[in-house]
Amino acid sequence: MNNFVIGLKRFFTNKNVVTIILVLVILGILYYGYSSSIKKQTNPVNMPVAAHTISSRTQVTDEDVMYTTVANSMIGEGAIRNSNDIIGKYTNVNVTIPTGSIFYSEWLSDEDDIPGNWIEQLDYKKGELGYYMDVSVESTLGKSVLPDTYIDIFMKATDENGTVMFGKLMKNVKVLVVHDGDGNNVFDNAAEIGTPSKIGFAVSQDYYILLKKAEYLDVELVLAPRGSTIPSQDYVIVTSSTLRDYIDAQTITVEEDIIAEEINDNDKNNENQDNAEGNTDQNNQNATE
């Protein structure tokens, strides 16, 4: 027994033996760490992904999200692991989420924080309503309609007798924002001005209803710099009151509750921003001729 103990003692005091044992221990630790890391990276994780392609500025619903197993190595920083943190959010401007893609926090925002959601982002006078009008490069006078400038809005229409009417429907309208097709501010980048697609301004409720009714008609709204005069053309020049009467007469069957619902949807700014009452900016002063 003593000889065994003495032999064992000599074995462990042998420098070569100790070195070999230490090397084996280190290799074992490295192998265990490497194996654990590989296992962690390759182990599948149940993750919410896009059930189909989701375009920009779109609210994500239950139908847009499904769960699938994804390797840990495929999950980047900022990935959202719970569908409750996805559903109800909106995809950001210029973000399109492809089918099967993981959702990332920088791709989604609350509705109020989406760039281009101008009604929530801009202040205007209490009692006014935000109106969003379709425009083009031509109708914005070659991109010369800028935020914080004033315009007049003309209208051209053909009455029941075939007479082409033209007149100034509104004047002194302050432009609040100009957006491109993706909801970005056209003039944010001075080096590369975007293409106007929408302009936003605020008007009284009466004029808001008038503009919403005009959307149902085959009329043309023409933007012009404030104070513009009506050019001489082959049409009958009429007053703004005549144009308003024409719109009201042609839209007598338009459901008033539809207009009321649209007013409610577009009046969030006045409901949510009590400080708007103290805004001294004169956004626009609509008046008849």
Image (cartoon, rainbow, N blue to C red):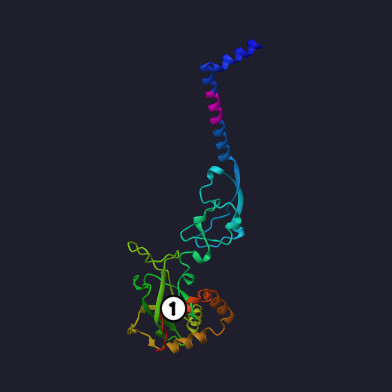
Q: How many marks?
A: 1
Magenta stretch: helix, strand or loop mostly: helix
Asked whether residue 96 is in view, the answer is no
Residue at position x 48%, y 57% in the image: 95
For this view, does 149 lie left or right of residue 129? left
Q: Which residue is mark 1?
A: 279
Picture quarter with the C terminus: bottom left
Q: Considering only vertical position in the picture, is 102 above or below 284? A: above
- State the residue lying farthest toward the right: 1
- Residue 260 or 245: which is nearer the viewer? 260
Q: 289 or 29, which lies in front?
A: 29
Q: Specify few, some or many for label 1: CA neighbours under 10 Å numbering under 14, 14-19, or 20 or more.
A: few
- Return the residue found at the far top: 3
Question: Residue 203's spot in the image, x, y percent?
Answer: 46, 80
SS assignment at label 1:
loop
Q: Please provide percent x and percent y for residue 1.
A: 67, 12
Q: Pick the residue in front: 227 or 86.
A: 86
Amino acid marked by disc 1 = Asn
Residue 24 sits inside the magenta stretch:
yes
- View extreme (front): residue: 2
Residue 65 is covered by the magenta coloring: no
- Report if residue 173 is visible in the image: yes
Where 41 sits versus 14, above or below?
below
Question: Does residue 148 appear left or right of residue 88 in this picture?
Answer: left
In the image, is residue 106 above or below residue 186?
above
Image location (x, y in percent) of residue 89? 55, 61
Residue at 57% x, 60% y: name it. 60
Q: Position of residue 67 (x, y in %)?
A: 61, 51
* Segment tinted magenta in the rendering: 22-30
User: Eyeballing the image, is 204 above or below 79?
Assistant: below
Q: State the residue at coordinates (64%, 12%).
A: 4
